[in-house]
Amino acid sequence: MKLSFYILVLAASVAWSQPVTPVEPALAEIAATRWFQQSAISPDGSHVAYVEALTAPGKSAIYIRAFQGSGAPVRITAGDGKTACDEESVAWSPDSKQIAFLSDCAKADQFEVYLAPATGGPARQVTHLTGLLANPHWSPDGKRIAILFTENLPHRAGPLDPVPPDSGVMESKIYEQRLAVVDIAAASSRQISPANMYIYEYDWSPDGQSFAVSAAQGSGDNNWWIAQIYTLSATGGELKPVYKPGVERQIAEPQWSHDGKSILFIGGMMSDEGSTGGELYQVSAAGGGEARSLTPGINSSVADFSWPKDSRYLYFSEHYDGGSAVSQIDPTSGQTERMWQGDETIFTMDGGGVALSADGKKSTVVRSSWDKAPEVWAGPVGRWSKLTQANEDRLPLWGEAKSLHWNSDGFRVQGWLIYPKKYDPSRKYPMVVSIHGGPASSMKPAWPKPGFNATLLSQQGYFVLLPNPRGSYGQGEKFTTANVKDFGGGDLRDVLAGVDEAVRTAPIDSNRVGVTGWSYGGFMTMWTVTQTNRFRAAVAGAGIANWKSYYGENSIDQWMLPYFGATVYDDPAVYAKSAPIEYIKNVKTPTLVVVGDRDGECPAPQSYEFWHALRDLGVKTEMVIYPNEGHRFHTPAHQKDVLVRMIAWFNENLK
């Protein structure tokens, strides 16, 4: 009851009128940015389709234009073109003449599959379903479309979204995401995967007779970490096991080889569904064999891959040294060549990759960095030309970013140091260290999005250090797995060594340094202030204070087993070893704590436990719980409020 009352009180507090501060111009610049969600190239390489977010929250639009960018883009929609809808997930037909896409124009918040001519014209609805649809893909013969379908799902799926509020008798209602196949001519669909299995990803076989899928039983949000690879007949039936990874490896993006004899996938230590990194593997589609790495010992992390139908080469994008890269590999010989690398973020959909034509000679990608707002680009890999000019007027209102490297425990660690916007080398500046989430992730240059983002502290006169400590992507699996059973140990040493390097490199006042982060970065913030008094202020976003209680509170406990080696019931000591609450009496640092009240990944009681302890111990602290928010905030007012509060806290305690 006390926690519920506190949520209500603080829910009212977020409506306080925020005074106009120097951060307003940067917020306006971000608000004016146009964002792209997907870019897809036709198999013949003649046209590019892309999805652009609209100003109305949760709405998006699809456009098609020629590969060379000549002529105006053509809007593809299932609506009248005037009413805003959510239209996304473009899939080109094999003959490049049509696109399939999802739209909720017929009924708000209910996707259906539509087909439209690539040249424009009326769209035709081919499904009439109730529930969540995702990820349409054409069969090789162009007569069917596969779709992921969660029947009767009452809300958007995903661990980052708000979990339903708890009330009444607790039960585990599982909505299984199944594979369905749509017969285009008949406009009919049928679910073909077993009702007791959750399908995460899939790929048509080259002959269109079967699928490769990643799947697991039970809760979809929780069991991605134990998913296995199976094959499934295109007519339905039981799943046939192909590959079961060990506990130390997760799988992503199963795809068939050209000859249909093997399945390729990304395998590695991954802490978040959708945040992919590892090595590229191949396993026999018949099952029973060992998986073979095609990129053994690679000094990067494979983020996404594609094997174009008419290309001898397979292409994969990478997290690499704090930036991105694209390489090609001949799967037969194993010969690999780096095609491009850059200090930026690239993606086509869901966070990674390059979309390629059937021959692999043309591609499209969305590119973004701290200097350049996102745009769609097209061309041969690494030789892209800008296809859109949506953000030509956007200007960075934050300072220059420089890549730093330093040594820590035998590792060569990378991080980004963002300089104050109005930098004067004769002055000393405060600095804030921002630790990314994951931990299996990577801080790469990208145009800031609305919400919790320490980059904007640069505009306030701060240096901002963004380290990629051990556990991050970008330096191979040995580096990514180096924090197993050691959360907060070696990675904190990496961060502190990075602070030393930044102070050595730039005019930073070592007595005015703060620390912040979200998710795993929120845990690292809580942990850091219990281990050292070096930081003068801290802001912990969606953090984890007590790994022992967290195990029983969060909705995705399966992610913890690869990192801790056992459940909390079997080895509580390894969880206590990294729990900030165990060392709470060491804290002297003023700490702001923020979290969403319906966060299933890092539940609000974790933040409450940390704040409660600081309050009782007389440490300067404040806590804000945002109503109806999950791990990722969706409400624009909350996105702004959490950022402004973070900046105000550091201004108050560091300046």
Image (cartoon, rainbow, N blue to C red):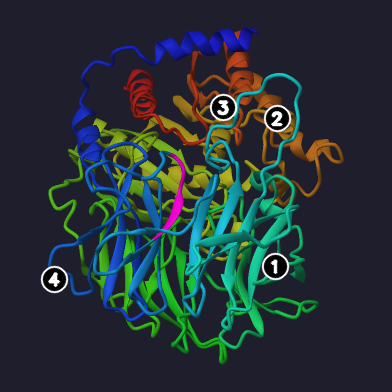
Q: How many discs appear?
A: 4
Percent x, y of residue 8 = 51, 10
Looking at the image, tell me whether mark 4 or mark 1 is earlier in sequence order.
Answer: 4
Instruction: State which quadrant residue 91 falls in.
Output: bottom left
Cα distance between the residues tagged 3 and 2: 12 Å
Nearer to the camera, 41 or 383: 41
Picture disc at residue 70: 4
* Other residues around mark 2 within 10 Å, as few (<14) / some (14–19) / many (≥20): some
Q: Amino acid at mark 1?
A: Gly
Nearer to the camera, 447 or 363: 363
Nearer to the camera, 476 or 92: 92
Question: Who's the residue at 34% across and 18% down the image?
Answer: 652
To which residue does mark 3 refer?
A: 598
Do callouts 4 and 1 mark residues in contact (Cβ within 8 Å)? no
Q: Kindly state the secondary structure of the residue where label 3 is placed.
A: loop
Q: Amino acid at mark 3?
A: Arg
Magenta highlight range? 109-114
Image position of 293 (left or right of 632): right
To which residue does mark 1 refer?
A: 236
To which residue does mark 2 refer?
A: 553
Cα distance between the residues tagged 4 and 1: 44 Å
Of the two numbered discs 2 and 1 in the rendering, the one whose residue sits closer to the viewer: 1
Q: Is residue 18 above or below residue 267?
A: above
Picture disc at residue 558: none
Of the two numbered discs 3 and 2 in the rendering, the one whose residue sits closer to the viewer: 3
Question: Who's the residue at 47% across and 12% down the image?
Answer: 10
Percent x, y of residue 519 = 54, 37
